[in-house]
Amino acid sequence: MSSPVAPMTLAGLQMPVRAELERVQKELRRIIEADFQLIREVNAHLLQMQGKLFRPTIMLLADQATGGPTPRAVTVAAVVELIHLATLVHDDSVDHSVLRRGMPTINALFSHQVSVIMGDYLYSRAVIELVRLDEFETLRVLSRVTNEMTVGEMRQLLAHDPLEFSEEQYDLLIRAKTASLLAGAAEVGALAAPPAERAALRRFGEALGMAFQIVDDLLDYTADAAALGKPSGSDLREHKVTLPLIYALPRMAESERRAVAGLLRNAEPADGQIADVIGAVARAGGLDYARERAQRIGQQADAELDFLPPSPARDALRASITYVLDRRS
């Protein structure tokens, strides 16, 4: 009988680039430091609530998989994380979120005005750094990504009737809001590579980002609040319709669809309402469908890596797919 395979952890995935990631942290602090007192206070909180450096990890692994490490890689990886931080600051303000990774959001701790201005500050610092380094091709890629993410945010704002939100619209949204930055991170790691490898890594990053967001939306239905670092069911609480519910809605009983509509009309849905809808989504197969869809997209990401020469970094990129699909928080 074979032994069970241990799940891929983020720490294991990051082993080949651990030293570089420590330097990314230092670069982040250097890039965002400012003489202005309020900016220093917000920056200190941002660095405390900073995430797991998943996007810089993908960028650094792409760099190594295509002939690196290159001298530019650490600073560019820091810029990628800086753009990610800026999007989170703006998203939390737009969504009026109060928690991010178990800590108060910038808009909750300071104000929505400060949150909007700080997001702009982080974006501008990213641009200044890339111009300073003459990284104009990186700037071209990440400017396109930033524009795509902005359009994605607008798509979400214009989704006036959540019950009519289709899977096609959902794909457009998550491709713009989440997958575009992972696609950009993988692509800027491969700017010195042959065109076929660069294009394959961009497609890999996009597929990985799509799978990442589907799993993230699934976890909102299945994980507890302590694991998520935010209230469970928060998407439903904020009237966001994601893939599990999109698939389940036409397969629900009429009474269950009325319950969903009632929740979406309620400005502050009760925990019981949210639990009832989560149960209905599970019974209608929404959770299973989301898992299967993420797995299929993960297979697409895996196929793109066949364009790269064999290397430990390519193996780590392949392991990132397993990490994304199996994560629990």
Image: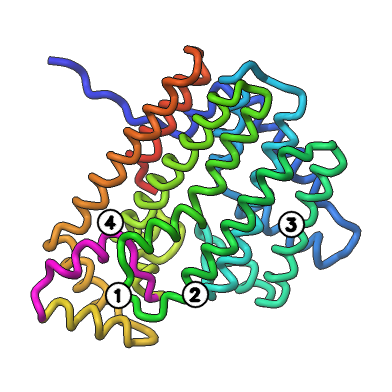
* Distance Cα–Cα, label 3 vs label 1: 35 Å
Residue picked out by circle 1: 164
- Residue occupying the point 37% across, 76% down: 239
Mark found first going from the N terminus, 4 or 2? 2
Q: 312 left or right of 106? A: left
Q: Secondary structure at mark 1?
A: helix
> Dots 4 and 1: beta carbons under 8 Å?
no
Report the predominant secondary structure element of the magenta stretch.
helix
Residue 149 image-quadrant placement: bottom right
Residue 3 image-quadrant placement: top left
- Residue occupying the point 32% across, 87% down: 265
Kind of residue sitting beneath label 2? Leu
Please tell me whether mark 4 or mark 3 is closer to you in this view: 3
> Dots 4 and 3: beta carbons under 8 Å?
no
> Dots 2 and 3: beta carbons under 8 Å?
no
Q: Which mark is residue 122?
A: 3
Q: Secondary structure at mark 3?
A: helix
Residue 170 image-quadrant placement: bottom left
Classify mark 4: residues with Cα within 10 Å, few (<14), some (14-19) or many (20+): some
Residue picked out by circle 2: 157
* Distance Cα–Cα, label 4 vs label 3: 33 Å
Please tell me whether mark 2 or mark 3 is closer to you in this view: 2
Q: Position of residue 101 (x, y in %)?
A: 51, 56
Q: Secondary structure at mark 2?
A: helix
Mark found first going from the N terminus, 4 or 3? 3
* Distance Cα–Cα, label 4 vs label 2: 25 Å
Instruction: Please identify the quadrant where the N terminus is shown.
Output: top left
Q: Is residue 36 a member of the stretch shown in magenta?
A: no
Residue picked out by circle 4: 222
145 shown above or below 111: above
Please tell me whether mark 4 or mark 2 is closer to you in this view: 2
Kind of residue sitting beneath label 4? Thr
